[in-house]
Image (tube, rainbow, N blue to C red):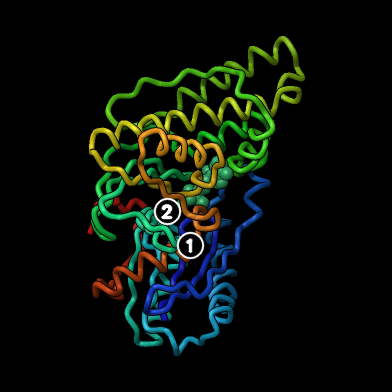
């Protein structure tokens, strides 16, 4: 059995996977307290990881029907992420690995999001392109194997998840606003037009959109102070439609440039219903294949860390006890 730990941001998660790569359990403790601060407070997040990690690991082992002595390796997220949060998972994995005398396997958080596809029945074939969209990152990645990935384009400012969350803040919604905007957008009509930024190559930008939304709200609220309340679902539908079109236009460009026909989504924002249906429509238009993990494997979880750890474990790629958290770990690092 392989135990996997994820603690890069505000979710403490543990999963157990067998040696054939079958997921036996996946437990996620989400830190609800950040809602009231409108964003993740790093110091509070690391303290919550400290109190959550032992019960979460115990529960993952219990649900998998195994004990610590059945474990043969421990995978953990080394980075990127919040330093204090990562440190809890890294230290826990090192300590338990040392106590049990078993190898530890370091996992890159974005690689784990991408490899979450291999937890599903329908798996992409190599090479494939993955749009990784989360609260801290937005990239188009070419995947040649489970351990060989290249970034083709990335955001030059905010991540797609930040675009959702910052819009939510302007609209007075709770954090994280992505799922709330998604829900409201389904009841609305995208009748407000926000311009699409002209960014070269396969890169993205979302800060201009945020400024446009702010100006739009200021102008309309001057004329009608109840503008947001009266038009909330239409505003959400319009913002979501623009974020989705920015993302999918670049993914389409990348597929045409590389001639790669297998397209995938990963990261928290891939839970977005507009993005999921937009990708399906894009793939149908061109006769391409598309892959989207089930929603609980899109947001942060240890099942994806187990999958990524499984590939490295099988390849004999272990970390040593000197390993430390790497908050800015680049995707292309070995
Ligand atoms: O991958 P993730 O759980 O954490 C990071 O690694 O960042 O992604 C969290 C982000 C947040 O910005 C959240 O608002 C966004 O994913 N998100 C969504 C949806 N569900 C989560 N954004 C849009 N629509 C959703 N349904
Ligand atoms: Zn993530």
Whether residue 188 sits left or right of residue 86 in the image: it is right
Residue placed most toward the observer, 321 or 137: 137
Is residue 4 placed above or below 115 in the rendered structure? below
Other-residue count near label 2 (Cα within 10 Å), few / some / many at <14 / 14–19 / ≥20: many
| Disc 1: which residue | 7
For label 1, the SS is loop
| Disc 2: which residue | 81
Q: Position of residue 67 (x, y in %)?
A: 51, 87
Splitting the image into 4 quarters, where does residue 124 fall?
bottom left
The residue lying at 51 percent from left, 34 percent from top is 163
Is residue 106 placed above or below 123 in the rendered structure? below
Is residue 278 placed above or below 132 in the rendered structure? above
The residue lying at 64 percent from left, 45 percent from top is 37
Whether residue 235 sits left or right of residue 288 in the image: it is right
Is residue 174 placed above or below 219 in the rendered structure? below
Marker disc for residue 159? none
Other-residue count near label 1 (Cα within 10 Å), few / some / many at <14 / 14–19 / ≥20: many
């Amino acid at each position: 059995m392989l135990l996997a730990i994820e603690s890069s941001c505000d979710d403490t998660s543990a999963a157990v996977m067998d040696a054939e790569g079958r997921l036996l359990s996946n437990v996620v403790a989400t830190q609800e307290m950040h809602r009231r601060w409108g964003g993740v407070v790093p110091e509070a997040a690391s303290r919550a990881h400290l109190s959550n990690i032992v019960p979460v690991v115990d529960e993952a082992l219990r649900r998998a029907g195994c004990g610590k002595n059945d474990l043969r390796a421990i995978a953990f997220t080394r980075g990127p992420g919040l330093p204090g949060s990562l440190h809890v998972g890294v230290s826990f994995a090192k300590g338990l690995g040392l106590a049990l005398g078993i190898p530890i396997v370091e996992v890159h958080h974005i690689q784990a999001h991408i490899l979450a596809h291999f937890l599903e029945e329908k798996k992409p074939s190599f090479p494939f392109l993955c749009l990784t969209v989360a609260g801290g990152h937005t990239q188009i990645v070419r995947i040649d194997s489970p351990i060989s990935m290249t970034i083709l384009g990335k955001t030059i400012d905010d991540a797609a998840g930040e675009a959702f969350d910052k819009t939510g803040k302007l609209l007075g919604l709770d954090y994280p606003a992505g799922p709330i905007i998604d829900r409201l957008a389904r009841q609305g009509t995208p009748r407000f037009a926000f311009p699409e930024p002209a960014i070269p190559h396969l890169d993205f930008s979302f800060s201009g959109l945020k400024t446009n939304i702010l100006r739009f709200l200021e102008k309309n609220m001057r004329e009608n102070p109840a503008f947001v309340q009266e038009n909330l679902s239409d505003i959400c539908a319009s913002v979501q439609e623009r974020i989705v079109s920015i993302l999918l236009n670049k993914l389409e460009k990348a597929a045409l440039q590389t001639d790669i026909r297998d397209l995938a989504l990963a990261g928290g924002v891939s839970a977005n219903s507009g993005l999921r249906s937009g990708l399906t429509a894009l793939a149908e238009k061109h006769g391409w294949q598309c892959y989207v993990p089930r929603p609980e494997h899109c947001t942060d979880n240890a099942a994806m860390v187990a999958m990524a750890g499984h590939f490295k474990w099988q390849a004999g790629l272990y970390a040593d006890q000197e390993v430390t958290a790497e908050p800015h770990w680049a995707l292309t690092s070995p």
